[in-house]
């Protein structure tokens, strides 16, 4: 572990200790007499710059839009990526962004924090209960109702998937609205899946690019062999897996490797490959593939948001918290399961798509 990682870990631990007791969800107020159409502005606080963490709030944004038909949603985030991910979300209005490296832009960082006071909200939602910045921004903002998103033990016991990072804030959101007295809230209905909301023209462009890279007479399996840190599987692991995938599917399907921004390959570029820094274009290309296989990463969640079934590979991260969430997707714990289980998962997905 690098010195920078150690310092950041210590900093986060200290800040969590200082902020964990900040605020309580404002549920002692009465929302009776307030109709769903009266809620006009909601702030979601997720001051994190990681691709996966921002994609995991797309179900919450959809839930808010479905519950409050005239509502605009503001996002409090870090970095510029939200502008890309939420480009086609009509309900998303202001994106209030902290600089990705606050210590290099301290004045701008402080200015963004104080800008929160300019706005008034009906509801403010902190997405991650362990986020010190999320708790602080929720406390700092002007809002009628504030949801800090602490663990609800009753919900935790009732719903097996309560701990998933895409579902946890939605379950809490619904429960809080019921406690406040809002009408028409069904806590048991299906939770929206990850969705980047590709346009038909984007999907068509993705297909055109895919057809230029592989045999367009065959359908395509996409793989992503990279991940950050210890989540990245070794070259030996991926080369063995790729050989098995070729043996199982090579005659019937194209196998295409989607490359990371680092433009590296754990299979030494043995397969046809696709490289782009355009996240929406990448999502559209993956949308045109039959199944995506990759380790837990932001691109894995991007594939879910593309509405493509995903076989997510997990070795060190919490599967229940971060497994791919969209129709047909599956998670594989490679500590307990092997390539046969991966092939079985792919077979099930391909059979469903016939």
Image (spheres, rainbow, N blue to C red):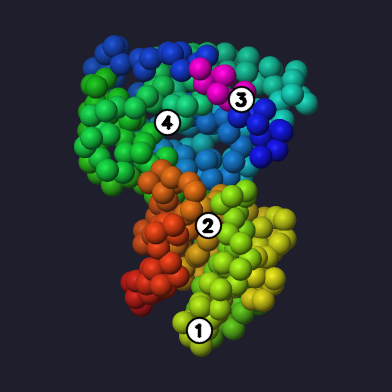
| Residue 10 - label | 3
Q: Earlier in the sequence, mark 4 or mark 3?
A: 3
Q: x, y (%) of residue 204?
A: 56, 67
Residue corresponding to mark 4? 71
Distance from Cα at disc 4 to Cα at disc 3: 39 Å
Please give left or right for residue 186 compared with residue 87 in the image: left
Residue under the point 54% across and 64% down: 286
Q: Which quadrant of the view contains residue 338?
A: bottom left
Residue under the point 46% across and 39% down: 57
Q: Residues within 10 Å of mark 1 (few under 14, many from 20)?
A: few
| Foreground tag (4 vs 3) | 3
Q: Which residue is situated farthest in the bottom direction here?
A: 251
Magenta span of residues? 11-17
Q: Are the residues at dot 4 and dot 2 in contact (C-beta closer than 8 Å)?
A: no
Q: Earlier in the sequence, mark 3 or mark 2?
A: 3
Give the number of callouts: 4
Q: Main secondary structure of the magenta part?
A: helix
Distance from Cα at disc 1 to Cα at disc 4: 51 Å
Q: Which residue is situated farthest in the right direction here?
A: 104
Q: Secondary structure at mark 2?
A: strand
| Foreground tag (4 vs 2) | 2
Asked if residue 186 can be seen in this view, the reply is no
Distance from Cα at disc 1 to Cα at disc 3: 47 Å
Residue corresponding to mark 2? 295
Q: Secondary structure at mark 3?
A: helix
| Foreground tag (1 vs 4) | 1
Q: x, y (%) of residue 301?
A: 50, 52
């Amino acid at each position: 572990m690098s010195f920078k990682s150690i310092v950041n870990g210590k900093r986060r631990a200290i800040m969590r200790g200082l902020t964990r007791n900040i605020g309580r969800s404002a549920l002692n107020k009465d929302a009776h007499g307030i109709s769903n159409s009266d809620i006009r502005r909601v702030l979601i606080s997720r001051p994190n710059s990681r691709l996966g963490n921002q994609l995991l709030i797309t179900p919450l944004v959809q839930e808010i839009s479905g519950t409050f038909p005239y509502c605009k949603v503001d996002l409090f985030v870090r970095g510029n990526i939200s502008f890309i991910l939420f480009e086609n979300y009509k309900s998303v209005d202001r994106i209030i962004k902290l600089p990705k490296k606050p210590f290099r832009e301290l004045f701008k960082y402080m200015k963004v924090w104080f800008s929160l006071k300019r706005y008034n909200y009906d509801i403010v939602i902190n997405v991650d209960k362990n986020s010190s910045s999320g708790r602080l921004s929720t406390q700092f903002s002007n809002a009628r109702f504030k949801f800090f998103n602490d663990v609800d033990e009753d919900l935790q016991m009732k719903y097996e998937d309560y701990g998933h990072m895409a579902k946890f804030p939605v379950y809490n959101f619904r429960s809080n609205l019921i406690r406040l007295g809002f009408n028409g809230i069904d806590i048991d209905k299906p939770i929206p899946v990850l969705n980047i909301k590709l346009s038909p023209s984007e999907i068509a462009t993705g297909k055109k690019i895919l057809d230029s890279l592989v045999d367009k007479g065959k359908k395509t399996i996409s793989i992503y062999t990279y991940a950050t840190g210890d989540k990245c599987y070794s070259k030996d692991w991926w080369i063995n897996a790729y050989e098995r995938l070729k043996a199982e599917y090579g005659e019937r399907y194209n196998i295409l490797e989607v490359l990371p921004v680092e433009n590296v390959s754990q299979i030494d570029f043995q397969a046809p490959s696709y490289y782009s820094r355009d996240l929406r274009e990448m999502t559209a290309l993956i949308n045109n593939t039959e199944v995506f296989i990759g380790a837990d990463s932001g691109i894995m969640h991007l594939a879910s948001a593309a509405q493509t079934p995903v076989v997510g590979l997990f070795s060190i991260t919490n599967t229940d918290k971060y497994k791919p969430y969209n129709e047909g997707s599956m998670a594989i714990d490679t500590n307990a399961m092997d390539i046969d289980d991966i092939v079985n998962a792919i077979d099930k997905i391909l059979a469903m798509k016939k």
